[in-house]
Image (cartoon, helix red, strand yellow):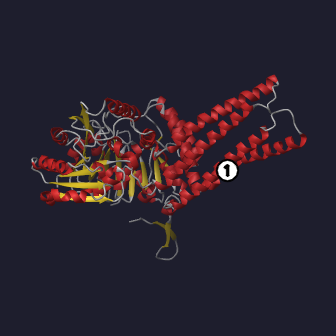
């Protein structure tokens, strides 16, 4: 199997049939095998019944039904877990992405990129959704160093190993490219078409920007700290070390010169307090090393997934990069 | 196998064989294959002595003994491994609800339900115990926003999948329906008739109340924050840090504009203390986040009902 198309669905009964037929339309031109994976994220409408009906006529459709609504990240991860393709394409189920863009994404992947992200250059959403997302995108780009314009676009293509080994959780789906690029994956983007929403209501609210921002902050922190916890905590403890030294000197001076202004013990107590904070942070850092050291270390081995074999072609002239596909 | 009945034997009641026989006749009437598993939990040799009386049930009886008194979560895991039924009825060491209610609970588990949790009506235990049980259940309902009224009933009916997919440990067996509901399993409550109560009555000792409160807090944390501990800890940490910072700012401004000497202000120590506490709480959260990121990445967050 070469390609798996993963589509998370939440209450999409109206758009479902159209979505499948447009994917199948594009699929006719594929000269490789592919599968479609629908993930029903705990829909409360007839989504699942429609999927069951569509399944009867479409043998290469696979469908997963969640017990309840778990969110887009979980739906995508479940899709990845059950995908057997070498390349995984994700897209939205609300017809705002156009399956006709899939061949373009695949072309970029064939060029050697690990992740190709869609960029909704002409977004057809209300301005109140576009603006916050632009701000969020700029911040993600700045803080992660991955220069994409549109992290929120669901239409993306991945080399399967790259995204499977991330083992994402929580609300990470927006950070797949950022997360993967920290492991050394080659990330790029191409403009894709974007249609206005026809059916149903948007599942996003304005308040999400705060949540997204705190997610970005937390993700950055977690990735850095998980790589070398003691170093991270030691950096955090630095201000307290400085405070300890400063208060300590003042305490000694106050003893020598018998300072009478101020309570006699003030500097001693302040020294003790800040040194406690310092020690606390350092011990946490050591504990962090213990936690990371006892884990299976899979998160530190992520860069390995991007390794590529270099082969020399038959005439022995040109060196090529061949992508190793995991089994 | 359709039904497995798991009986937790925790106290040596003389009428235990009758209880098992009663269960046997109830299930025999259902005309479906079933088995009875008895998990003796720290009752010494009691079960061994009773086995003679249960001789004629031998073909569908499996009896096990845990040598030390263990938690219900351990008993359940041990029994689950030995059981084969699709539907599992768990009950305590004596008949707590009437036979009719037992049957009612079993029948209520239809195709769209995964757990049946009995709600004892007209309780027969002392009013004081009913009161504290009400308070406990009310607290749990409010904190977990579930709608279960009776978490202390020893009888429950589960679909096998529920128990296989929902992990509980320590004292958390009591809250299993809530934990399972958060994974997406459908829980319903069935009103039942309370037959008898042999549990503890009157005031419990102080430590049981404290333990119960800690259990509720554990449930609250586990159901909300296991995958994002930083959210929880940073909420505490940030508020302490901000309080400390504001106090420090106030003292500093007083020094600058009113000339009050800053060195001797004990309130400045309070500010420093509060800020230190804030940093500590947040950093513990960060450590929690590292634990989740490095150790829980294999644990699947979602629960799949069906794949086609």
Q: Secondary structure at mark 1?
A: helix
Between A233 and B48, the residue placed more toward the observer is B48
Between A138 and A327, the residue placed more toward the observer is A327
Relative vertical location of residue A225 with respect to residue B274 in this rendering, above or below = below
Q: Residue B8: horizontal and vertical position, in percent? A: 27, 50
Q: Residue at x 45, y 53 (%)?
A: B296
Q: A36 left or right of B244?
A: left
Q: B283 left or right of A61?
A: right
Q: Is residue A163 visible?
A: yes
Q: Residue at x 21, y 43 (%)?
A: B95
Q: Residue B174: horizontal and vertical position, in percent? A: 34, 43
Between A139 and B270, the residue placed more toward the observer is B270
Q: Is residue A101 visible?
A: no
Between A316 and B84, the residue placed more toward the observer is B84
Characterize the local packing of mark 1: few (<14), some (14-19) or many (20 or more) Cα atoms within 10 angstroms. Answer: some
Q: Quadrant of residue B131?
A: top left
Q: Chain of mark 1?
A: A
Relative vertical location of residue B147 with respect to residue B110 in this rendering, above or below = above
**Outermost right residue:** A257
Which residue carries the number 1 mark? A279
Q: Quadrant of the N terminus of chain A?
A: bottom left
Q: How many marks?
A: 1
Q: Residue at x 53, y 48 (%)?
A: B288
Q: Residue at x 38, y 66 (%)?
A: A327
Q: Residue B177: horizontal and vertical position, in percent? A: 32, 42
**Outermost bottom residue:** A315
Q: Residue B135: horizontal and vertical position, in percent? A: 38, 31
Relative vertical location of residue B99 with respect to residue A79 in this rendering, above or below = above
């Amino acid at each position: 199997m070469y390609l798996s198309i993963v589509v998370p669905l939440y209450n999409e009964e109206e758009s479902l049939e159209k979505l499948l037929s447009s994917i199948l339309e594009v699929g006719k031109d594929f000269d490789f095998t592919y599968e479609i994976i629908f993930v029903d994220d705990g829909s409360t409408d007839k989504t699942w019944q429609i999927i069951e009906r569509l399944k009867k006529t479409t043998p290469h459709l696979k469908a997963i039904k969640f017990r309840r609504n778990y969110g887009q990240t979980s739906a995508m991860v479940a899709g990845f877990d059950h995908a057997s393709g070498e390349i995984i394409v994700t897209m939205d189920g609300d017809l705002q992405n156009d399956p006709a863009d899939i061949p373009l994404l695949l072309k970029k992947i064939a060029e050697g990129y690990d992740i190709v992200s869609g960029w909704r250059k002409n977004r057809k959403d209300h301005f109140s959704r576009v603006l916050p997302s632009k701000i969020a995108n700029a911040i993600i780009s700045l803080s992660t160093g991955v220069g994409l314009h549109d992290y929120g676009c669901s239409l993306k293509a991945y080399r399967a190993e790259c995204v499977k080994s991330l083992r994402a959780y929580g609300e990470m789906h927006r950070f797949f490219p950022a997360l993967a690029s920290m492991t050394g994956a080659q990330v790029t983007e191409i403009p894709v078409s974007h249609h206005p929403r026809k059916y149903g209501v948007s599942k996003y609210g304005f308040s999400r920007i705060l949540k997204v921002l705190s997610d970005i902050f937390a993700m950055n922190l977690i990735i850095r700290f998980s790589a070398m916890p003691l170093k991270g905590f030691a950096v955090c403890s630095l201000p307290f070390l400085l405070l300890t030294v400063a208060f300590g000197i003042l305490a000694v001076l106050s003893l020598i010169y018998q300072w009478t202004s101020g309570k006699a013990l003030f500097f001693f107590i302040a020294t003790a307090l800040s040194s406690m904070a310092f020690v606390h942070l350092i011990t946490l850092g050591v504990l962090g090393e213990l936690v990371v050291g006892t884990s299976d270390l899979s998160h530190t081995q992520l860069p390995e997934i991007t390794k590529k074999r270099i082969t020399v072609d038959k005439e022995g002239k040109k060196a090529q990069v061949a992508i190793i596909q995991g089994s | 196998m359709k039904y497995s009945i798991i009986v937790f034997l925790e106290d040596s009641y003389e009428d235990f064989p009758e209880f098992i026989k009663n269960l046997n006749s109830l299930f025999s009437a259902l005309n479906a294959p079933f088995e009875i598993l008895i998990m003796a939990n720290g009752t010494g040799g009691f079960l061994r002595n009773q086995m003679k009386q249960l001789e004629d049930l031998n073909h569908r009886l499996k009896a096990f003994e845990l040598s030390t008194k263990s938690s219900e979560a351990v008993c359940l895991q041990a029994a689950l491994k030995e059981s084969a039924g699709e539907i599992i009825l768990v009950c305590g060491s004596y008949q707590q609800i009437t036979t009719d209610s037992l049957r009612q609970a079993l029948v209520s588990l239809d195709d769209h339900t995964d757990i049946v949790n009995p709600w004892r009506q007209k309780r027969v235990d002392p009013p004081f115990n009913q009161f504290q049980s009400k308070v406990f259940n009310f607290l749990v309902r409010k904190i977990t926003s579930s709608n279960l009224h009776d978490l202390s009933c020893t009888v429950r009916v589960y679909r096998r999948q529920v128990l296989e997919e929902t992990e509980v440990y320590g004292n958390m067996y009591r809250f299993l329906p809530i934990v399972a509901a958060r994974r997406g399993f459908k829980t319903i409550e069935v009103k039942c008739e309370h037959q008898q109560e042999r549990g503890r009555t009157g005031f419990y000792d102080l430590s049981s109340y404290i333990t119960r409160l800690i259990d509720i807090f554990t449930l609250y944390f586990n159901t909300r924050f296991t995958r994002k501990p930083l959210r929880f800890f940073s909420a505490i940490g940030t508020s302490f840090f901000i309080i400390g910072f504001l106090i420090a700012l106030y003292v500093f401004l007083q020094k600058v504009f009113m000339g009050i000497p800053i060195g001797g202000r004990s309130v400045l120590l309070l500010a420093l203390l509060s800020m230190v506490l804030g940093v500590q709480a947040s950093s513990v959260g960060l450590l929690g986040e590292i634990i989740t990121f490095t150790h829980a990445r294999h644990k699947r967050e979602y629960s799949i009902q069906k794949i086609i």
